[in-house]
Image: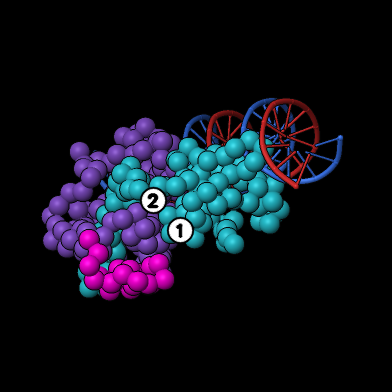
Chain colours: A purple, B cyan, C blue, D red
Amino acid sequence: MFELDIRSRKPIYEQLVDKLKELIINEVLKPDEQLPSVRTLAQQLTINPNTIQKAYRELETQGFIYSVQGRGSFVNANTYVKDTEKMAEVKSKLEKLILEALYLGISAEDLYSLISELEAGKGGGQNDDSNK
Amino acid sequence: MFELDIRSRKPIYEQLVDKLKELIINEVLKPDEQLPSVRTLAQQLTINPNTIQKAYRELETQGFIYSVQGRGSFVNANTYVKDTEKMAEVKSKLEKLILEALYLGISAEDLYSLISELEAGKGGGQNDDSNK
DNA sequence: TAAGTGTACTAAGTGTGTTAATACAGTTGA
DNA sequence: TCAACTGTATTAACACACTTAGTACACTTA
């Protein structure tokens, strides 16, 4: 279900947050669908339940899932509504990265076509890391 | 000369590498220009000389500067040639970030205008049209 | 020679991520 | 009711990377 990179600078729980967020936004995981329990997922990924728990808590804080004690954790509806705070963060990151790209010699045209490609394949596609 | 973010996840030495690389690529620091000594810069930025040293070593490894014992560290010529490895990395990051932006509701048009703005203000502004 | 440069090394402190082991509280279904 | 599942919380320990600190050495330059 997931591929995690232990060698990454980004911590496991955060990678997990990203993956799940993507699946939720992309509606691979649908509203009110139940997520694997912290213990189950921990066993599947051979990592500690506390790490899963940390990811789930973060996702709940960000409003992507909701957890009910004794029942489980579930995907929230309407999670793809614009999160202005998140948008600002992404825009800021994008600015820096685009600048870097331009400095490196990647042309604006290259970027335009990259965007249009990504936009075209948005709903159905898979990106570099595929699921399994 | 620099702005460092202590609160950032990215280590100081790496922020320093990025800043200096940008200045070099953008030719604010010109070929064979001498960089501040590790001790001087450390004092200016009120961080440890070893951290500067680490940044300089990294920059030398990546070919952006060269250091001569007893003399100092200097900007390398021809460092702005395309670093394909770095370009690939930036492109990969860009893809993910653009996807995230699109999912968040930032439109492709927004991204286009962002790019053109950044490109216009890039270097102090000579180029506009025939950039390929 | 003195003062500046890069370079190397060890030690210690710090913060964060991760694992581990427990424990408690709520829900569900037999 | 009760066993087995859920989420949640806490504490301890470990690992690792970043950073600081101090010291030392080799080299260059005025």
In the image, what residue type sits under mark 1?
Answer: Glu
Circles 1 and 2: CB atoms closer than 8 Å: yes
Query: Nearest the camera: B20 or A27?
Result: B20
Q: Judge the density around disc 2: few (<14), some (14-19), many (≥20) Cα neighbours within 10 Å.
A: some
Q: Is residue B115 in the magenta section?
A: yes
Residue named by callout 2: B80
Q: Point out the image quarter for the N terminus of chain B.
A: bottom right
Q: Is residue B40 in the magenta section?
A: no
In the image, what residue type sits under mark 2?
Answer: Tyr
Describe residue D20's horizontal placement relative to residue B73 as left or right: right
Residue at the location (35% across, 71% down)? B126
Chain for numbered disc 2 = B
Q: Secondary structure at mark 2?
A: loop
Chain for numbered disc 1 = B
**What x and y, as percent, mark residue A111?**
24, 61
**What x and y, as percent, mark residue B84?**
31, 44
Query: Nearest the camera: A107 or D18?
Result: A107
Query: Nearest the camera: A56 or B57?
Result: B57
Question: Residue B116 appears in which quarter of the rendering?
Answer: bottom left
Residue at the location (31% across, 55% down)? A105
**What x and y, as percent, mark residue D27?**
67, 31
Q: Secondary structure at mark 1?
A: loop
Residue at the location (44% across, 47% down)? B77
Q: Point out the image quarter for the C terminus of chain B.
A: bottom left
Which region shows up in magenta? Answer: B112-132
**What x and y, as percent, mark residue B81?**
35, 48
Q: Judge the density around disc 1: few (<14), some (14-19), many (≥20) Cα neighbours within 10 Å.
A: some
- Specify the label residue B27 is tagged with: 1
Describe residue B70's horizontal placement relative to residue A115 as left or right: right
